[in-house]
């Protein structure tokens, strides 16, 4: 799961490999692989952030017990196999060939330490993945049991829990972000904040990757990303704004090409459903008639064509079709413009001004399209700008906004993570609803969120989640708009088939 806010400019994934008739640029084994990313990681402590750009880097340094393949199927990682002695116990047998980059073999005690540490990090975006872990029991150096408080399908959660070295983490204390040490194929070599992060090989990792050195170059100024691409000619660009695509194609830089395919990033409008919202005596969005009218006026196909030049799909719900829990029968609320205007008039909202909060620096094209649509039913729109990410996060957590653009990437391939993170009623301990910025609450959705992972029959669990998605779609706490295609600029000297999860694992990149 990765939460995206503001108009999403960084595009995550593509599922297309390519072949070129041109002669690829020459390279040597020592040539660094240059990857252009959109922001400086907030921290290199792998158990704190769940941010897109952080994951690109930390995913190459740290491993988890299990991982996804390219199509969201689970496969062994640090755990070579696992069994279920009973319905609340998962027994893991570690890969004896897995070593931290300091040469120490991973032990079951490292896994136990990592999970117990995460359970204490109340500021962590990953905390929810430990929700049902009641005990970790080390059986020997290579074997451990993870016990859950209820019968619980825990494997998907374990994908997102990076394993640290107990010895190293205790030794460095608060400086873990400066000296991250994992079992992944790469280790941190240097870091120039807001400029570059360099990774080199973990010499104890097997099999040895073909790429020996990675340079993550930070391109945080949205307006300069295309200039950076043309100047640096990186091997992989992960942050090209849609509005720069046509310019890139016209310039047609040698050695680089643009790739796109279906993505899983869903862009939506958050409706803040708190009873009291600053600037309003009573929150007008508490009236389902107004939320329905705002939804009915939106032309999602026009949004896809205008905003992303056709590189996307209209969103009918808060997850993409590739995600477990998607319901093909769900459609956006349907009504004519006349019916929407009647709902607005009936509620006494003619002439109401609805502000959309968004981060500074975008083109605001999507916001303006929404304003144009709403004007047809007598609703005015206005922009309210957050100057910084910190300002935005404060406002979202405090509910100091009426509407805001957001996006969600369901990286686990399972809608249960969105239910837990963004749709369950918020809890003070952040175990559920940490990202529920709509302040939405529905007891039936909460029940399904808490119970669905106890159901081991996939068909029954799918039906439960789809029922929750129908309920959410009827309540309209969020207004789904579009699903982005995933777009990369890729050098013709490399071959890479990106996974559906959006991970950038450099061990899977090969030179042509």
Image (cartoon, rainbow, N blue to C red):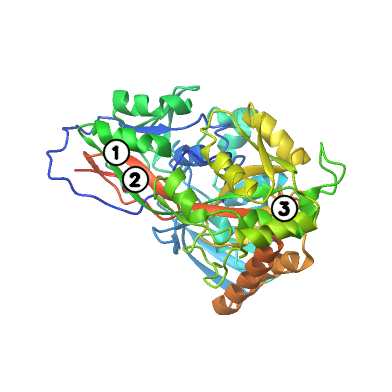
In-image side of 502 versus 480 (left or right): left
Secondary structure beneath dot 2 equals: helix
Residue 433's disc is 3
Residue plotted at (81% across, 42% down): 277
Of all residues shown, which one is farthest toward the right?
A: 281
Displayed quadrant of residue 174: top right
Position in image of residue 129 (x %, y %): 63, 54
Q: CA distance from mark 1 to mark 2?
A: 7 Å
Q: Residue at x 23, y 31 (%)?
A: 253
Circles 1, 3 touching at the beta carbon (< 8 Å): no
Crowd tier of the residue under label 2, counting other residues whose Cα lies within 10 Å: few below 14, some 14–19, many 20 or above: some
Inter-mark Cα distance, 2 to 3: 34 Å
The residue nearer to you, when weighing 119 against 344, is: 344
Q: Residues within 10 Å of mark 3 (few under 14, many from 20)?
A: many
Instruction: Tell me, yes or no, whether the two marked residues, 1 and 2, touch with CB atoms within 8 Å.
Output: yes
Looking at the image, is 277 positioned above or below residue 68?
above
Q: Which residue is mark 2?
A: 507
Looking at the image, tell me whether mark 1 or mark 3 is earlier in sequence order: 1
Q: Which mark is residue 211?
A: 1
């Amino acid at each position: 799961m990765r939460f995206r806010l503001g108009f999403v400019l960084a595009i995550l994934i593509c599922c297309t490999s390519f072949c070129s008739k041109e002669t690829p640029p020459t390279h040597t084994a020592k040539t660094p692989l240059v990857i252009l990313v959109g922001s400086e990681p907030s921290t290199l402590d792998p158990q704190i952030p769940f941010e897109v750009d952080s994951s690109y880097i930390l995913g190459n340094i740290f491993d988890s017990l299990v991982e996804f393949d390219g199509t969201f199927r689970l496969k062994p990682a640090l755990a070579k196999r696992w069994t279920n002695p009973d319905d609340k116990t998962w027994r893991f047998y570690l890969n004896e060939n897995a070593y931290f980059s300091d040469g120490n073999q991973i032990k079951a005690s490292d896994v136990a330490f990592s999970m117990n540490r995460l359970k204490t990090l109340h500021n962590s975006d990953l905390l929810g993945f430990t929700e049902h872990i009641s005990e970790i029991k080390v059986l020997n150096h290579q074997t451990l049991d993870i016990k859950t408080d209820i019968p619980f399908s825990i494997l998907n959660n374990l994908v997102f829990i990076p394993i640290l070295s107990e010895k190293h983490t205790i030794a460095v204390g608060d400086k873990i972000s400066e000296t991250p040490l994992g079992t992944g194929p790469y280790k941190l070599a240097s870091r120039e904040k807001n400029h570059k992060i360099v990774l080199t090989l973990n010499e104890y990792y097997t099999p040895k990757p073909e790429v020996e050195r990675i340079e993550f170059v930070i391109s945080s100024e949205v307006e300069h990303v295309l200039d950076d691409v043309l100047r640096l000619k990186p091997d992989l660009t992960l942050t090209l704004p849609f509005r720069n695509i046509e310019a890139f194609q016209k310039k047609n830089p040698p050695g680089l090409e643009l790739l796109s395919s279906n993505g899983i990033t869903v862009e939506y409008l958050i409706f803040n459903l708190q009873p009291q919202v600053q600037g309003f005596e009573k929150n007008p969005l508490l009236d389902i008639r107004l939320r329905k009218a705002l939804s009915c006026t939106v032309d999602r196909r026009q949004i896809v064509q205008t905003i992303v030049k056709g590189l996307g799909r209209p969103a009918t719900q808060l997850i993409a079709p590739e995600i477990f829990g998607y319901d093909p029968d769900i459609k956006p609320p349907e009504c004519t413009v006349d019916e929407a205007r009647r709902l607005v008039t009936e509620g006494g909202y003619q002439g109401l001004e609805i502000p959309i909060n968004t981060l500074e620096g975008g083109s605001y094209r999507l916001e303006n399209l929404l304003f144009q649509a709403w004007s047809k039913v007598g609703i005015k729109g206005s922009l309210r700008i957050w100057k910084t990410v910190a300002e935005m996060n404060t406002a979202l957590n405090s509910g100091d906004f009426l509407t805001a653009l957001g996006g969600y990437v369901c990286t686990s391939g399972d809608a249960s993570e969105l239910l837990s993170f963004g749709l369950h009623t918020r809890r003070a301990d952040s175990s559920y609803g940490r990202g529920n910025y709509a302040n939405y609450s529905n007891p039936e959705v909460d029940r399904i969120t808490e119970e669905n992972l106890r159901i081991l029959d996939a068909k029954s669990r799918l039906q439960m989640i789809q029922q929750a998605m129908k309920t959410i779609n009827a309540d309209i706490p969020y207004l789904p708009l579009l699903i982005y295609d995933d777009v990369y600029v890729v050098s013709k000297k490399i071959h890479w088939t990106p996974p559906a999860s959006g991970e950038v694992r450099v061990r899977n990149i090969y030179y042509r």
